């Protein structure tokens, strides 16, 4: 384990502008580390507490000081991601992604209605008649709302629904009520749970969404998938290309990868610290090493006060490992 001084010495804090608001975020703050095994990203969302953020640091230390486990594939199919925008904005969002075969669409956004979701999903289906479409509610519905919404949205054909409801018990109930008409994926119930395997034990989901950073690293995520015994989709945490590299390592190391992965999110950003960025081409990303670019680190350097905040946070999280 690197000492705190070692981490602080190789740390850079950047603020990357988003092209479009995503989960309330318009600027993504990221602390990057240059370790002996490569660049690493520490970017827990600013509202996360230190216990949760410490898992993201464990993942960064794996990337920079241990390296990734062996890959079994070198190309990862990737989905386009559509935030909770209006139907009119959908063409513009999709235009940022190259040859899209799978789309994930955010639904159940606070302050919006089921009508907004139907319009947005309908707009995607209209533009991409043959694409696989999945939705992500981030636990924004209750059981009745979820069953009603998924039944309506399924007229467009849904590959699966990610975290339609907040709890494991509610997921199990929705899955039972949908009776196979729409597959259920667990995201927050895995990455924010004290027991990430509770979903699998309860039979609450057909598949898991796994993210390297929130789960404490690629190896830990692989263990969770193996123990759960469910198919997995690897997704980003809205990272820079450095964090996406860790997601690719996870997707590349999984024994099976039956679904496209949510690793195309650099296309939602208006800045990155790797050149060229890890974005999907022809529906997927070829796995490769990445390094932060010194000009981009300088261009997107965070203001001094935010640098200070992230360095303090790094220290608190390091003390928890
Ligand atoms: O999976 C994707 O297509 C993109 C990644 C994505 O949706 C997310 C990234 C970061 C934070 C999360 O709220 C969100 C998700 O819920 O999966
Ligand atoms: Mg999700």
Image (cartoon, rainbow, N blue to C red):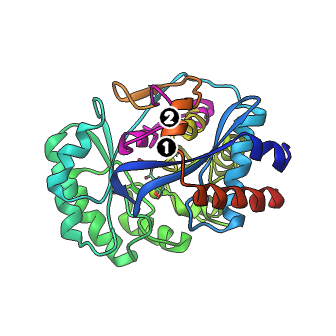
Query: Is 266 part of what is drawn in magenta?
Result: yes
Dominant secondary-structure state across the stretch colored magenta? loop
Question: Residue, x 40% and y 77% (percent of image)?
Answer: 142
Q: Residues under labels 1 and 2: Cα distance? A: 6 Å
Is the C-beta of the residue carrying label 1 under 8 Å from the nearest atom of ligand 1?
A: no
Question: Would you identify the image quadrant in which residue 44 lies?
Answer: bottom right
**x, y (%) of residue 173?**
46, 72
Residue drawn at x 38%, y 50% is: 18
Query: Image check: 297 left or right of 95?
Result: right
Q: Is residue 284 visible?
A: yes
Picture coordinates of residue 180, whole percent (x, y): 38, 57
Q: Position of residue 127 (x, y in %)?
A: 15, 42
Would you name the residue on which mark 1 appears?
A: 300
- Is residue 223 something that shows in the picture? no
Give residue 296's mark: 2
**Is residue 281 located in the magenta-colored stretch of the structure?**
no
Cβ atoms at labels 1 and 2 below 8 Å apart: yes
Q: Which residue corresponds to the image point at 79% horizontal and 55% vertical from the top-left?
A: 318
Position above or below: 188 against 18: below
- The residue segment tinted magenta is 249-277
Q: Decide: few, some or many residues near mark 1? Use Cα within 10 Å; few <14, some 14-19, many ≥20.
A: some
Say if 92 sits above or below 280 in the image: below
Along the line of sight, the residue nearer the viewer: 53 or 27: 27
| Residue 60 image position (x, y, % from top left) | 69, 44
């Amino acid at each position: 384990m690197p000492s705190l001084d070692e981490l602080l010495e190789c740390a850079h804090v950047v603020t990357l502008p988003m092209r479009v608001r995503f989960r309330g975020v318009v600027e993504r703050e990221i602390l990057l580390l240059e370790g002996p095994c490569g660049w690493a990203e520490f970017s827990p969302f600013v509202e996360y507490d230190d216990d949760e953020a410490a898992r993201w640091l464990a993942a960064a230390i794996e990337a920079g000081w241990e390296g990734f486990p062996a890959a079994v594939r070198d190309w990862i199919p990737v989905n386009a991601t559509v935030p909770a925008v209006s139907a009119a904005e959908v063409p513009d969002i999709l235009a940022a992604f190259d040859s899209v075969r799978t789309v994930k669409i955010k639904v159940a956004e606070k302050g919006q209605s089921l009508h907004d979701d139907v319009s947005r999903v309908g707009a995607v289906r209209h533009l991409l008649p043959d694409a696989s479409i999945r939705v992500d509610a981030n636990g924004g519905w209750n059981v009745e709302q979820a069953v009603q919404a998924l039944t309506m949205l399924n007229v467009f054909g849904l590959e699966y629904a990610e975290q339609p409801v907040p709890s494991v018990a509610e997921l199990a109930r929705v899955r039972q009520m949908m009776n196979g008409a729409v597959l259920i994926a667990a995201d927050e119930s895995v990455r924010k749970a004290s027991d990430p395997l509770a979903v699998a034990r309860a039979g609450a989901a057909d598949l898991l969404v796994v993210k390297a950073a929130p789960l404490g690293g690629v190896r830990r995520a692989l263990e969770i998938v193996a123990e759960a015994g469910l198919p997995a989709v690897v997704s980003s945490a809205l990272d820079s290309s450095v964090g996406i590299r860790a997601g690719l390592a996870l997707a590349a190391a999984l024994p099976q990868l039956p679904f496209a992965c949510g690793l195309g999110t650099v296309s939602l950003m208006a800045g990155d610290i790797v050149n060229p960025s890890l974005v999907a081409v022809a529906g997927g990303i070829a796995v490769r090493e990445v390094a932060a670019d010194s000009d981009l680190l300088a261009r997107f350097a965070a203001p001094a006060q935010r640098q200070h905040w992230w360095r303090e946070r790094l220290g608190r999280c390091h003390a928890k490992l």
